[in-house]
Image (cartoon, rainbow, N blue to C red):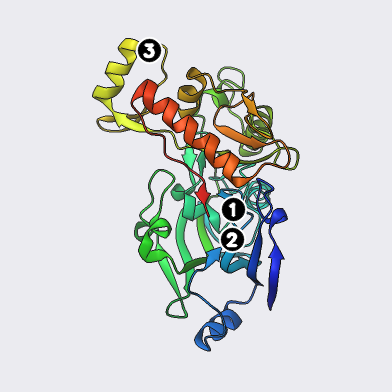
Amino acid sequence: MIKIHQNYPLKQSNSFGLESTASIYIETDDSSELINELKNNTIDISNPLFLGTGSNIVLSTPVVGTVIHATNKEITVLEESRDSVLIKCGAGMDWDEFVKWTVSKNYGGLENLSLIPGSVGAAPIQNIGAYGTEAAICVESVVAIDFASARKFSLTREECHFGYRDSQFKRPESKYWMVWEVIFLLEKDPRVNLSYKPLKEFFPPEYRPDIREIREAVIKIRSSKLPDPAVFGNAGSFFKNPVVSACQAGLMKEKYPDIPTYYHNPGTVKIPAGWLIETCGWKGLRRGQVGIYPKQALVIVNYGGATADEIISLANEIQESVKTEFGIKLEMEVRIV
């Protein structure tokens, strides 16, 4: 069923809690009906915004184009073998609810991504990642709707071109692609992933937790470091961790011996953006109703009544500060609309 709203308020549709409206807001759980509407040219697709829970976005202005929100939440087991299971999930499903379901079935692979805000449809777009893993590892394929050609099609994992917080869906040529369903390949005999040091240290030495314990640990760790959007509006990590050459990292180590670095690819390393921001003195700073979360320098928070311009202005200042101190331009992880 398709529901069409005019001048729809979006404050509850973005985790920053920013005031905004959509001139046209469409919510649907029926792909066939949606495609028919597209074929009949009854939907303005000149400037579409595909919006999930709005957990990775800054709505800087009232949205002039059409906002489309998928509400399909079906979970379907497509195939099973002795070792693995293929599961299809609707894009409108809450991500953490889906992870909770997979863990309850003892299907392994997504437990380290527990408590990440957002919808299932956003997971492959952003290639969400945390605690030593990424969604791309478990995504088998993605079903999307092309608004330009009014057709449904599938992309394999390889065709999604996953990268660090990146995918084919972020490319300009994919502007009219709406993720409709995601197919995941999960393990029936789960192998736990303790590659992330703080997660490994959460458990006693030599202890081998199961995926339920991994999920519980991730939830506790994340909750201790990150603000609840229901209390303080935020979009999680505002900046990506920069990737630099091993040579550049070596030179930085000479000046900053305690700078943490992590292997990324041959010849490159990843540096925590939070460390760079904190070293520049931003952690815990508050300016009016906008600030840097005291427990995590990567998170910009809305203490209540902040505007998009205030958030963006603070983000730009942080970028300039880090660039001046370290010669690194931080890239925003959130999308500015």
**CA distance separating discs 1 and 3:** 37 Å
Above or below for 74 versus 334: below
Pick the front one: 177 or 30: 177
Q: Name the element at disc 3.
A: loop
Which-is-in-front pick, marks 2 and 1?
1
**CA distance separating discs 2 and 1:** 11 Å
User: Residue at the location (66% across, 54% down)?
Assistant: 94
Amino acid type, label 1: Leu
Q: Name the element at disc 1.
A: loop
Q: Mark 2 or mark 1, which has the lower sequence index?
A: 2
For the image shown, how many numbered marks are present on the structure? 3
Above or below for 60 versus 247: below
Q: Which residue is mark 2?
A: 51
Residue 178 in view in this figure: yes
Crowding around mark 1 (Cα neighbors within 10 Å: few <14, some 14 to 19, many 20+) is many
Give the image location of residue 140, x and y in percent. 45, 58
